[in-house]
Image (spheres, rainbow, N blue to C red):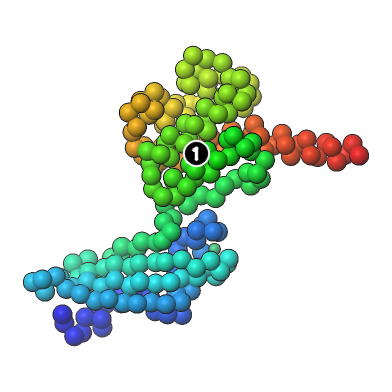
Amino acid sequence: MSDDWDLSYNHGTHEGEDVRCPCPDCGRDTYHTVLTNVVQLGSSESRSMQFWDDYQVVECKGCKRCSFRKVYADSESVDLSRGEADETIEHYPQRINNRRAIPDAHLIPAEVLPIYEETLAALRSNLPILAGIGVRAIVEAVCKHVSATGRTLESRIDDLVPKGFLTSDGARVLHATRLMGNVAAHEMLAHTNDDLIKGIEIAEHLLRTVYVIPAIADGLSRRSST
Ligand SMILES: [Zn+2]
């Protein structure tokens, strides 16, 4: 490995510096302080390629949650015009589809809430097959709860529209994602990230409309009648 390796490129961040990255608790990008940074340098067997790994413990400046960040780059990915390398960054816990549960999720009934929570966990863990099954299970549970009629889930989703729980656009999106087709249940397809995000957003809209908003409204009307 060349001695001037770590001087050649403006790589990585150092202890005490701030980096912007997704926070597992805040559910969005925030500034994090690098508390610890361990750098490991290495080279390929032929020494033609050099690489480095930065292993970092980072702390969110908002909620103070600590997590782990790994930055990898190698000499093949250096952009000489910038003097910087393209970095591959991983986080642990994983931040893929880092969604938080909707506000007042505790108002969702006990038979539906665990399905919702496990679906979010599957999304966060990048398990697209299980996440797809979870989104479908949430919609099925809501359809059952509001006695949506229809022989197939597709037609029961359509029945949510006249019942006022879903807009026709929402129903169209659910159908378009193919999450709700029989194919999903029987062939266990790994859905695209885009489909999963659209699906969970509509499932969350349903949970809000069917469980959360009525419970809040009941609470308010009870308070105003006392
Ligand atoms: Zn945070």
Instruction: Looking at the picture, tell me which residue is in the foreground, 209 or 136.
Output: 136
Residue 200 lies, in percent from the top left, at: 49, 39
Question: Ligand 1 near label 1 (Cβ, under 8 Å)?
Answer: no
Residue with the mark numbered 1: 200
Quarter that holds the N terminus = bottom left
Quarter that holds the C terminus = top right
Q: Quadrant of ligand 1?
A: bottom right
Residue 154 in view (yes/no): yes
- Locate residue 121 relative to residue 183 in the image: left or right: right
Residue 79 in view (yes/no): no
Residue 105 lies, in percent from the top left, at: 63, 44
Instruction: Kindly identify the residue that appears in the image at 29 percent across and 67 percent down.
Output: 72
How packed mark 1 is, by other alpha carbons closer than 10 Å (few <14, some 14-19, many 20 or more), is many
Instruction: Kindly identify the residue that appears in the image at 25 percent across and 81 percent down.
Output: 6
Q: Relative to 11, does residue 144 appear above or below in the rendering?
A: above
Name the kind of residue labelled 1 in the image.
Ile
Q: Residue furthest top?
A: 151
Q: Residue furthest left?
A: 46
Residue 36 lies, in percent from the top left, at: 42, 77
Q: Relative to 39, does residue 225 appear above or below in the rendering?
A: above
Q: Residue furthest right?
A: 226
Q: Relative to 225, does residue 58 appear above or below in the rendering?
A: below
Instruction: Kindly identify the residue that appears in the image at 40 percent across and 24 percent down.
Output: 181
> In what element is the residue under mark 1?
helix
